[in-house]
């Protein structure tokens, strides 16, 4: 027959292992709760309020937004009244559950804005299209052509960035 201390050692080891496994499972659950894919309503509400303040109250924002998914916020006045001028359409994505910020592409009548907003409401311009209001014309035709070429190359890079974020398709803003 075996020593009773041997059985006690086995029971002790099993208890320690079980304790370690339960602790890991609790930590994993906590991490999942923190990394939840749903953007908290209070955080999202701050972004929505700031964007409406900047672009107009008629924007229609979806509810129950998840992190790192692309959403649209169309101008409902433009949709309802078929306005052709003075509207905005915003395509956005909320990033980083631990320190949320929102990247968005706002497309208006004849230009766009690509920006980032922090939870404190601070905005920063991101890569955006150049030449939206035309390109300069110089007396030196070669300089004019070089400028247009530079703008085209820049805009192709910006388009690739916006496609990668899901804000544009290869066909443009409309999906």
Image (cartoon, helix red, strand yellow):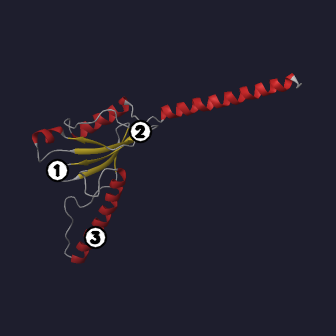
- Toward the viewer: 62 or 55? 62
Residue at 19% across, 36% down: 58
Quadrant for the N terminus in the image: top right
- Asked if residue 123 shows in the view, the reply is no
Could you say which is closer to the camera, residue 129 or residue 22?
22
Measured as percent of width and height from the top left, residue 123 is found at 34, 44
Q: Which mark is residue 100?
A: 2
Q: How many marks do you count on the picture?
A: 3
Identify the disc placed on residue 109: 1
CA–CA distance in space, label 3 to label 1: 25 Å
Is 147 left or right of 26, judged from the image as shown? left
| Residue at the extreme front of the image, as rendered | 1
Crowding at mark 2 (Cα within 10 Å: few <14, some 14-19, many 20+):
some
Residue identified by numbered label 3? 149
Q: Is residue 40 visible?
A: yes
Query: Do labels 3 and 2 touch, CB within 8 Å?
Result: no
Instruction: For mark 3, give the secondary structure.
Output: helix
Residue 150 position, x and y percent, is 30, 68
Residue located at (22% from left, 45% from top) = 89
Of mark 3 and mark 2, the one earlier in the sequence is 2
Q: Secondary structure at mark 2?
A: loop
Task: Indicate left or right for 56 with 155 as reference.
Answer: left
Q: Residues within 10 Å of mark 1 (few under 14, many from 20)?
A: few
For image coordinates 28% across by 45% down, the residue present is 91
**Pointers 2 and 1 in contact (CB under 8 A)?**
no
């Amino acid at each position: 027959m075996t020593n009773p201390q041997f059985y006690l050692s086995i029971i002790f080891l099993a208890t320690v292992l079980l304790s370690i496994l339960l602790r890991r499972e609790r930590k994993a659950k906590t991490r999942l709760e923190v990394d939840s894919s749903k953007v908290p309503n209070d955080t999202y509400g701050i972004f929505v309020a700031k964007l409406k303040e900047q672009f107009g109250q008629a924007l229609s924002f979806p509810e129950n937004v998840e992190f790192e998914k692309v959403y649209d916020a169309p101008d409902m006045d433009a949709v309802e009244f078929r306005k052709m001028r003075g509207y905005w359409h915003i395509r956005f994505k909320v990033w980083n559950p631990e320190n949320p910020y929102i990247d968005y592409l706002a497309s208006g009548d004849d230009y766009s804005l690509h920006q980032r907003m922090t939870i404190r409401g601070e905005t920063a311009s991101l890569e955006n299209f150049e030449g939206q209001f035309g390109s300069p014309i110089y007396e030196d035709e070669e300089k004019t052509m070089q400028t247009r070429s530079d703008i085209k190359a820049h805009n192709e890079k910006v388009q690739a960035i916006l496609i990668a974020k899901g804000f544009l398709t290869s066909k443009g803003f409309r999906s």
